[in-house]
Image (cartoon, rainbow, N blue to C red):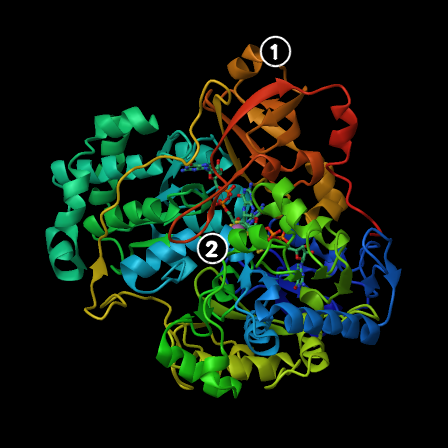
Amino acid sequence: MEAAAHRTATHCPYCALQCGQWISPSGEVDARAVYVKEDSPSGVGGMCQKGWTSSALLTHPHRLTSPLVRPSRGAGFVETDWGSALSRVATKLAALRAEHGPDSVAVFGAGGLTNEKAYLLGKFARVALGTSQIDYNGRFCMSSAAAAGNRAFGVDRGMPFPVTDLDDAELVVLAGANVAETMPPLMAHLAAARLVVIDPRRTPTADRAIASGGLHLAPRPGTDLALALGMLHAAVVDGHVDPSYVDDRTTGFDDVWRVVSQWWPERAERVCGVAATDMRTVVRWLAGTRRRYVLTARGVEQHAHGVDTVTAWINLSLALGLPGRPGSGFGTITGQGNGQGGREHGQKSDQLPGYRHITDPAARAHVASVWGVPEPSIPGPGRSAVELLDALGRPGGPKALLVFGSNVLVSAPDAQAVAERLDALDLLVVADVLPGETASRADVLLPVAQWAEEEGTMTNLEGRVLRRRRAVAPPPGVRTDLEVISGLAAALGAPGEFPSDPRTVFDELRRASSGGIADYTGVSYARLDAGEALHWPCPAEGHPGTPRLFTDRFAHPDGRARMVPVDHVGPDEDVDADYPLRLTTGRVLVHYQSGAQTRRVTELAATAPEVFVEVHPDTAARHGLADGDLADVTSRRGTTTARVRCVPSLRPDTVFLPFHFGGPGAANNVTNPALDPVSRMPEFKVAAVKLEAAAPAAADRTRTTTSLPAHP
Ligand SMILES: Nc1nc2c(c(=O)[nH]1)N[C@H]1C(S)=C(S)[C@@H](COP(=O)(O)OP(=O)(O)OC[C@H]3O[C@@H](n4cnc5c(=O)[nH]c(N)nc54)[C@H](O)[C@@H]3O)O[C@H]1N2
Ligand SMILES: Nc1nc2c(c(=O)[nH]1)N[C@H]1C(S)=C(S)[C@@H](COP(=O)(O)OP(=O)(O)OC[C@H]3O[C@@H](n4cnc5c(=O)[nH]c(N)nc54)[C@H](O)[C@@H]3O)O[C@H]1N2
Ligand code: SF4
Ligand SMILES: [Mo]
C-alpha cells in the first residue's frame, strides 16, 4: 500500500451515515484507492455500493466545468466566464429587489451541503439579499421527526446516542426504516439484536427481522399513528408502563392516556391492518428487554400527520422508559449526508444559526452581532420548501430562485406543478456538479466542486461533526459553493463578511452557534483533525462534546420530556372508487435521492436501470397486468409510467414506486403535496392512485426515465 502515506481520509458524498473513505491523490481518483477507513467515524467499517463507486463522479464525462447561461428564455446554453455569470446574476437580482422588494428573490438549500455552506447560504439570504425566502430540501426529509423531537425532548438530534451503542442492543424496533437498503453498513450494528420492522412492504430489512426471530408488521400506508396508539394501549393495560420513569422524567401522561384509552389494539387493528396480538407481542418484548431501542425514519414521517405519528412513537418509548436510559433509547435515522447539520445553521426559513428561532429577540440580537448588521435588518420567517416552490412566479411570490444542492424537479411532490412554477420565474440559478433535471432548466448554471475536492465539516446522524477533506483538485473552471456565495455577495455589494475559506466560515459559525441549542463553540478543525470525536453540544474549547443526550435531563426548562396527546386522523387523501390503491414511495439500494448522481454511475445504473412499480400479483392480474408490463400509475395530479414488478409479499391494497427517476418515470408526478401542519413536510408516503396498462407509446417514454442530459 505505497499510496497510504498520501491518501486522504474523508467521508462518503451520500447519506447521513457518512462512512469513512480513503481517496488517492492522483488527479484521477483510482477506484482501487478508495479504501474503507479503518477507524471509520461511524465505527462501521464498511461502505455500500454507492460509496464504493462514488469515485466515478469525480472524473465523470458529464461533469459541469464552465458557467453556462441562456442568452434568452428557451435558447440553448452558452459557455461564459465566472465574472460575466456572477455579474449577470447580481444585476438581475438587484433589479428585481429594487422593483419588487427583497422577498422577490428566493434561495433553496440542501441537507447535503456542508455545515459551512449551509451557514453561509443562510447568512447570504438574510444579509446579502435581505430576503426571508429561504428554505431547503430538509423539509422533505426529517422535518417531522425534528419537530416531534423538539416538542417532546426540547432538542432535535436525530440519534441522541452514538451509533455504536446499538451494537449491544437486544431489541430494535425500526418504524418506517429500510436500513438494509438505505444504510447497509448500519445493519452491522444491529446484528446482535432481534429486529421488529414496521413497513407496508417486506423489505430486505423486514427479511432480516424475520431471520432474527423478530417480526415484520405491515400496516396500511399512513396508519402508523393508530398502530402506535394501539401499542401504547396494550402497554398500559398489560402492565408494561414504567411508572417511576413516567413520574420522574415526563409530563403529560394523563392527557395522552385520555386519547390512547380509546385505541384498544383491536380497534387499531381495524385501521392499520396489523394484528392486535402482534402489537401486544412487540410491547411485551420491548418491556421485557433491558437493552432496547425504537428508531423511526421516513416511512412514518413523510405524512400529512408525520409529526403526530413520530410523537406517538415517542410517547410509547417514554411510557416504557427508553429515552436517556443507558443501553436504551429513541432515535430517528437522519437521511442526507449533512441532514443533521443542515438543519442547525440557518438555511431553514424559520431559523438562525445554533438551531435558534428567527423570531426570538435574543437569538436575533446575538446573530446580528456576529454578522455585524443591525438586528432589524434580519428578515423574519419565510415560506417552507413546498410553499416556497408553490409561490414562485405568482403575484407576490419570488421571481428569482437560487438552488444549491437539490434536484427539485424530481424530488419535490407534484412535479408537474413544480415545473410550471420554475417556468414562471424571471431567473433560475442552479449551482450543481452535474446537469440534472433542475440544473438543465436553469437560466444560469454554475459548476461547483464536490466532496472529495473541498474542505468542510458534516454532522452525521449521531450529531458527530466530521471533517470532509480535499483529496483531489477540482477540474479547472469549477468553483466551490463557498466561492460562489462569496462571489455573489461581493457582486451584490453586500454588507458584512462572506469569506470563501471553509475554516474561516466554520470559526464564524462556531461564534454564531454559541449559546444556542446546537452549540459548536468548542468544535474546531484542529480538534477534529487531531482525531477527536465531537458530538454537539460542545459549548467550550476544552469541552468533550456530548455523545449521549438526556441521561440526566431532557432539554426543556423543567428537565422533563413532554408526552403530547395525539390522535389518528389518516392520510390527507383516501382511496375511493376512482383511485382505489394506496401508493407509497421510497428508495432502492443503488440509487441516491433524485438519482442526479447515481443514475450516471455505470455499475449502479446497470443494477437498477429504470423505474418499476411493485404490485401484488393478484392486484396486477385484476388490472390485466403481468410482471414486466408497463403500467401507468395515476393520481389526481399526474401519471408515472413504470415497469410492473409483481411482489407476492406486498399488501394487495398498496403499490410502491422508487423516486429516483425523472420525466415520465418520476414518482413525484403523482405524489400529494399536502403538508403536515407543524413541520410543513409533504405527504410523500401516501397517495390514492389507479393502475392501468400503459399506452404502447409509453415504451419510448419510459426509456427517457434513465437518460440524463449529458450536456444541458
Ligand atoms: N440507497 C439509498 N440510501 C439512502 C438514500 C437514498 O436515496 N438511497 N437517501 C438517504 C436519505 S436522504 C434518507 S431520508 C434515508 C431514508 O431512509 P428510509 O426511511 O429507510 O427510506 P425510505 O425508502 O424512504 O422509507 C423507508 C420505508 O418506509 C416504508 N413506508 C412507506 N410508507 C410507510 C408507512 O405508511 N408506514 C411505515 N411504517 N412505513 C412506510 C417504505 O416501504 C420504505 O421501505 O435514506 C438515506 N439513504
Ligand atoms: N416521492 C418521494 N419523494 C421524495 C422522497 C421520498 O421518499 N419519496 N424523499 C425526500 C427526501 S428524504 C429527500 S432528502 C429529497 C432529496 O432530493 P433532492 O433534494 O433532489 O436531493 P439530491 O437528489 O441529493 O440532489 C442533490 C443535487 O445537488 C447536487 N449536489 C451534490 N452535492 C452538491 C454540493 O456540494 N453542492 C451543490 N451545489 N450541489 C450538489 C447533485 O448533483 C444533485 O443534483 O427527496 C425527497 N423526495
Ligand atoms: S451507507 Fe451511506 S455513507 Fe455509507 S457508503 Fe453507503 S451511501 Fe455512503
Ligand atoms: Mo432525506
Pointer 2 local density, CA inside 10 Å: few below 14, some 14–19, many at least 20: many
Confirm or reject: label 2 Cβ below 8 Å from ligand 1: yes
Is residue 469 among what the camera can see? no
Residue 580 drawn above or below residue 438: above
Pointer 1 local density, CA inside 10 Å: few below 14, some 14–19, many at least 20: few
Q: Nearer the viewer, residue 223 or 523?
A: 223
- Please state which amino acid type lies under the numbered disc 2: Thr
On the rendered structure, is 389 left or right of 439? left
Indicate the secondary structure of the residue bearing disc 1.
loop
Residue 67 drawn above or below residue 211: below
- Please state which amino acid type lies under the numbered disc 1: Gly
Question: Where's residue 527, x and y in %?
Answer: 50, 81
Is residue 567 among what the camera can see? yes
Q: Nearer the viewer, residue 326 or 592?
A: 592
Question: Where's residue 559, x and y in %?
Answer: 21, 68
Indicate the secondary structure of the residue bearing disc 2.
loop
Give the mark, 2 or 1, whose residue is nearer the N terminus.
2
Question: Where's residue 460, x and y in %?
Answer: 50, 63
Q: Which numbered marker is on residue 334?
A: 2
> Distance between the Cα atoms at labels 2 and 1?
40 Å
On the rendered structure, is 248 left or right of 228? left
The image quadrant that residue 401 belongs to is bottom right
Q: Which numbered marker is on residue 624?
A: 1
Q: Residue at x 68, y 51 (%)?
A: 424
Q: Quadrant of the N terminus?
A: bottom right
Q: Nearer the viewer, mark 2 or mark 1?
A: 1
Q: Residue at x 39, y 58 (%)?
A: 159
Q: Residue at x 23, y 67 (%)?
A: 553
The image quadrant that residue 323 belongs to is bottom left
